Amino acid sequence: MGFGKIIALAVSVGLVVCFVQGGPSKKEQKALEEKNNWWKNEVFYQIYPRSFQDNDGDGIGDLPGVTSRLEYLKETGITAIWMSPIFESPMVDFGYDISNYTNIHPEYGTLDDFDALIAKANELGIKVILDFVPNHSSDKHPWFAKSIAREDGYEDFYVWENGTLLENGTRVPPNNWRSVFSGSAWEWNDERGQYYLRQFTYAQPDLNYRNPAVVQAMDDTLQFWMNKGVAGFRIDAVIYTYEDIQQRDEPLSGTTSDPNSYDYLDHIYTKNQDEGYVLLQHWRQLLDNYSALNEGPLRIMMTEGYAPLTMLMDYYEDAQGVQGPQFPFNFDFITELNANSLAADFVFFIERWLIYMPRGHVANWVMGNHDNARVASRFGAQSVDAMNMLMMTLPGIGVTYNGEELGMIDYRDISWEETVDQPACEAGIDNYKWISRDPERTPMQWSDEANAGFSNASATWLPVHPNYKELNLRNQQQAQRSHYKVYQSLLKLRQLSALKNGDFIPEVVNRRVFAFKREIKGQNTLLTIINVKNQTEQVDISDFIDLPNRLQVLVAGVDSEHRAGERLSPEAIALAPYEGLVIQLSKRK
């Protein structure tokens, strides 16, 4: 590893620690810090491969398409991507139903294509994170077929139960558990003569993590992809990996009278079980050990789980200080804040995360993803620049979804005939629009060419938003001012020490405006100020900043009357509706 004679190798609190004869040099120490800490100030750019770029003309995005766009990401300033599932799948839930964890779905390419993607990403200095889906497999996975047949070693690979035989001879599920997508979480299998647990669709049977063979199979999967060169994993649906071993009925929630609704029950036995934390701690140790013994960056974990705040904080580390994932996703900008939120709401939820987060860990801010309405649709198109300023200047990690740099909007007019999202299809023609995730998954809008430059096919797997003629990357690259150029300038700004290491000091200016400083004593301070409402504001922040200070605009939005380099008076900062500004404060000499 270049550090002299290695005496021992260990992993301590998530850091790869090398004990060497004579100790590491300054150069070696810097290299070690870069290996361990690369992720702490990243913006992870989520790619939904099916909608990013079609290379072979079938109307579906693929890995060669992603590879062809890596230069664009480099130019933008992105240095880490997270790809939604690319594994072999029947595509009932578009990749979240995996039939082979160590192969690429044919529509997306081959393992050779993946190797080419990794090679190009390495060349450009872009790290690759894969989506890992451990809770369930596809019902087409060979493991499930073997489990149905009760083959040796696979009898208990999934969660099987007999159910209950009523006096009239009717067989019913073993308990009242509900599927996330409505109805019973139990599905009958005629061949085996038992019910299997499936917390999502019928085609996604839950794996049994109380079986050590399942844990080993997933350990092997992680090892396989690390050997392929990935820098880590986003772990999907972590809150569902274990259920109550006694399989007790869950109590009624009292929030709905619909017995088929997932919200009908209080899910105290099917989510957030203690064993789930232990499993993630095991995988953290696996990744840390691999990183210690191999070249390349520290391999990291980030987790997806919509859970109460205190439970999320236990993912960072438990009460005994045992380390879990590097960070659990913070969805507050999606679940807690929207266009109706006041300035104080934003400050409250930002500070809440920072206060509850265990000391020594790193915050993260998820602004959008493939399961929720886009930023422009949740907060309004006028808020796109301000929301990107917010995410990019808060302490820690940003998580952004492809297309958010352009201000792409949900396509809500997708017809019933064009709908492909499985839960929406199951909801029926009268309700599909309220459930469908297709609107936020439409193809990336690269240009004003046919299919927005996404594909040369006659039809694409989802329709392209019809606004692509105006809203596309090429137009925004050529424009003097654009959402893309704001986003790009914010990424460059994140290299400043104030944004990497500065203290976070917030202020609610009034009901509609909030601000925060990022500062390191003795150095220049950055100020972000945002108007979250639809009226013009003129605010006085002189009490919030240390006078005398010179205020200079660093980043302004596409429709702002302000310009980068402009000097401002702290007593009278004018903000248009939904406007944000990033400002540098420097001491007057």
Image (cartoon, grey):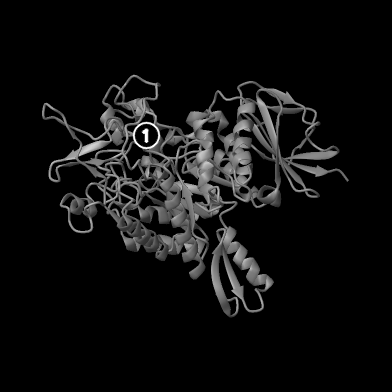
Q: Position of residue 325 (x, y in %)?
A: 50, 51
| Left or right side of 156 for 37 | right
In the rendered image, which quarter is residue 247 located in? top left
Q: Position of residue 271 (x, y in %)?
A: 40, 39
Instruction: State whether residue 152 is above or below residue 576.
Output: below
Return the residue nearer the eye: 486 or 107.
107
Q: Residue at x 49, y 58 (%)?
A: 127
Instruction: State whether residue 49 is above or below residue 23.
Output: above
Q: Position of residue 266 (x, y in %)?
A: 39, 29
Q: Position of residue 403 (x, y in %)?
A: 47, 41
Q: Can I make out residue 158 in this image?
A: yes
In the rendered image, which quarter is residue 434 located in? top left
Quadrant of the rendering where the N terminus is positioned: bottom right
Count of all numbered marks drawn on residues in the image: 1
Return the residue nearer the eye: 575 or 115.
115
| Left or right side of 442 for 167 | left
Return the residue nearer the eye: 510 or 151.
151
Q: Residue at x 54, y 71 (%)?
A: 9
Disc 1 crowd rating (10 Å Cα; few below 14, some 14-19, many 20+) is many
Per the image, label 1 sits on a secondary structure element best described as loop
Q: Residue at x 54, y 25 (%)?
A: 339
Q: Can I make out residue 389 in this image?
A: no
Residue lying farthest to the left in this orientation: 169
Q: Which residue is mark 1?
A: 437
Amino acid on which the number 1 mark rests in the picture: Arg
